Image (cartoon, rainbow, N blue to C red):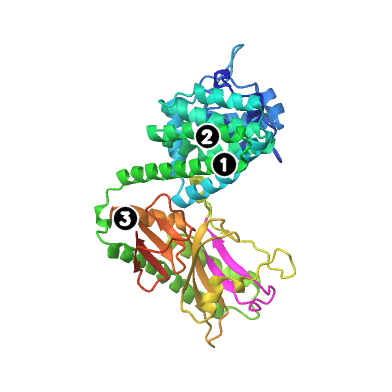
Amino acid sequence: MSRSLGLTAEARSAVFAPLAGPGRSEQVEQRMREAIVLGLVGHGERLPRETELARQFGVAVSTVREALDSLRNQGLVRTTRGRDGGSFITSSEEGQRELLAARLSGFSRAQLHDLALQLAAVSGTVAATAATRATSSDLENLRSITQSIDFGDEVSARRGEALFRVEVAAAAQSPRLVAEELRLQAEYGPLLWFGMRDQDLRDTVRRAQLSLIEALGMRDAATARAIVEGQLSTLTASAISFADRSRAGADDDAQLAPVTLADCASLVVETFDTVFTTLGRARDAFATTLASLAHPITKAALDGSVRALAEAELADGAQLVIGAGFVATPGFVADAAWHLAWWVRQAGDPLVQRLPPRQLAVVEDPESEFFRDYTRLEWWRGVASGEASHITGPYVDYLCTDEFILTLTMPVFDTSGAQPGVAGVDVTVSALEARFLAAFGRLGERVTLVNAQSRVVLSTDPTIAAGTLLAEGGERLPCGTLPLALVRH
C-alpha cells in the first residue's frame, strides 16, 4: 500500500483484518477488490505473500490462493515467479474507471438511493462518533489529507476523498465502523468516481471536508452528521444523472418515446395490464389444477401442482416479475394450516440468474415467534375484501426478496365459490425504472409515479427516492383505473 497516500495504521489494518465467520475465497476477494476500487492499494504495489495474507485474514492458504486466482482472471492482479516474484496490483486508472462504470450500471435508482441511505447511517454515525473521540493529532492528519489533494484532478480528488472518509472512521476509534466504512465505500464507489468528474462537485467535496474537520474540532456531532448526509445526497444525485445520460445515449428506440403525459400514463397502464393478463391466466390455471387434486390436499401435492405454473409466470413476466405463486387460505392445506407455494427468480450476476427459480421458505408454524400472519397484509386483504385485483406497494419485501417491490394479486375461487387462496406476482421497482424512466425522460420535465397514498414508485428527478412521500402540488394524471398516478411538478 502506497505510503504516499498517508494511510494510517488503523485504516491500513482494516483492509487485511481477519474475516468474520468461516473464511471463504469470495470474502477475501471482496476485501481485496474493495481496497483496489477505493485506491487504497495502488497500481504496481506488491501484495504480502500468500502465507502472510492467510495469517492476516485468518483463513487457509488455499482460500487466499483461490481468491488471487479470481482477481487475476479479472485483470486486477498479476503474479510472477522467481526470487523477486509475487502478486502485484495491476489496476490502472482506466481499468478502475471501467470497473466502477460497470458497478454503477448494475444499480437502479431505487438501489442507489437505498445504498445512500445505508451509507449515510454508517458514515453519519462515524462522523458523529469521531466528534466525541478525535484528538488534535487526528484533526491535523485530516487537514494534511485535505491539503494534499489536488481537487483540480478527478483521480486525486476521488482517492483523497476515499482516504479522508477512512481516516475519519479511524478517528472514531471503532474497528467495526472502519471495516463497515470500507465495505460500503467499495459498494458506493461509482458515486465517488463519476461524481468527481465534475469540478463543481469536487469543490463541494473540498468545502465539506473542511467543514467536517471544523465540526469535529468543536465536538459538534449533530453538525458532523449533517455534513456527511448532505454530501452523500449530492453525490447520489450526481451518480444517477450520469447513469441516466449513459442510458439515454444507448437508447435509440424512438418508437417508445411518448410526447405527452397521457402517453406516459398509457405506457404504465399497458405494462400493468400485461402483467395482470398473465396473472389472470395463472389464476385460472391454479383453480383448474386445484380442482383436480385429491382431497385432502397436502402441501407436497399443492407445491407439485403449482410449481410449473409459477415458473411459467416468472418466464412470461420477463425481467419485470421476480416472484410468483399461490398463497393458501388458512386451513385449505391439510398438513399445513398456513402455506405459501411461491417461487422466486434468482437475482445477482448472470451465472446466478441462469439457475432455476427457488421456492420461498417461510415460517408457517403459528407458534413460532417468527411467524407472520399473511392474511393481515395488504396484498391479501385487498382481494379478500372483494376486489377482483389489487396492487400493493411500493414496499420492502423483507419476507421474500429483500427488494423494493409492488405485489399484484387476484383471488382464486373453486367451483363452489369458495376462495382457496390468492394468486400473485412481485414486480421490482428496479424493473419498472428500466421500463419507464427512459420514456418518461423524453418529456423533458420532472415526472413522478406515485401510488394512491402519494408514495413514490419512481421519478425522473434524481433527488426523489422511491418510497418517500411526494408533497402536494403539481398536475396529477391517474393511470387508468390503477391505484397509480403520474405527477408533473
Q: Is residue 335 magenta?
A: yes
- Can residue 197 be seen in the rendering of this structure? yes
Residue beneath disc 3: 439
* Residue 3 vertical position relative to residue 333 in the rendered view, above or below: above
Q: Tell me the kind of residue under disc 1.
A: Thr
Rounded to the nearest whole Å, what is the CA distance between mark 2 and mark 1? 9 Å
- Can residue 289 be seen in the rendering of this structure? no
The magenta span reads 324-345
The secondary structure type at the circle numbered 1 is: helix
* Residue 419 vertical position relative to residue 428 in the rendered view, above or below: below
Which residue corresponds to the image point at 50% horizontal and 35% vertical from the top-left?
208
Q: Tell me the kind of residue under disc 3.
A: Ala
Viewport quadrant of the C terminus: bottom left
Residue 85: name its quadrant: top right
The secondary structure type at the circle numbered 3 is: helix
Disc on the earlier residue, 2 or 1:
2
Q: Is residue 99 left or right of residue 340?
A: left
Residue beneath disc 2: 211
Whether pointer 3 and pointer 1 mark residues with C-beta atoms closer than 8 Å, the reply is: no
Rounded to the nearest whole Å, what is the CA distance between mark 3 and mark 1? 40 Å
Viewport quadrant of the N terminus: top right
Which residue corresponds to the image point at 62% horizontal and 11% vertical from the top-left?
83
User: Of the numbered discs in the image, which one, if any, rests on residue 223?
Assistant: 1
Give the x, y percent position of residue 220. Answer: 61, 39
The secondary structure type at the circle numbered 2 is: helix
**Residue farthest to the bottom?**
416
Residue 483: name its quadrant: bottom left
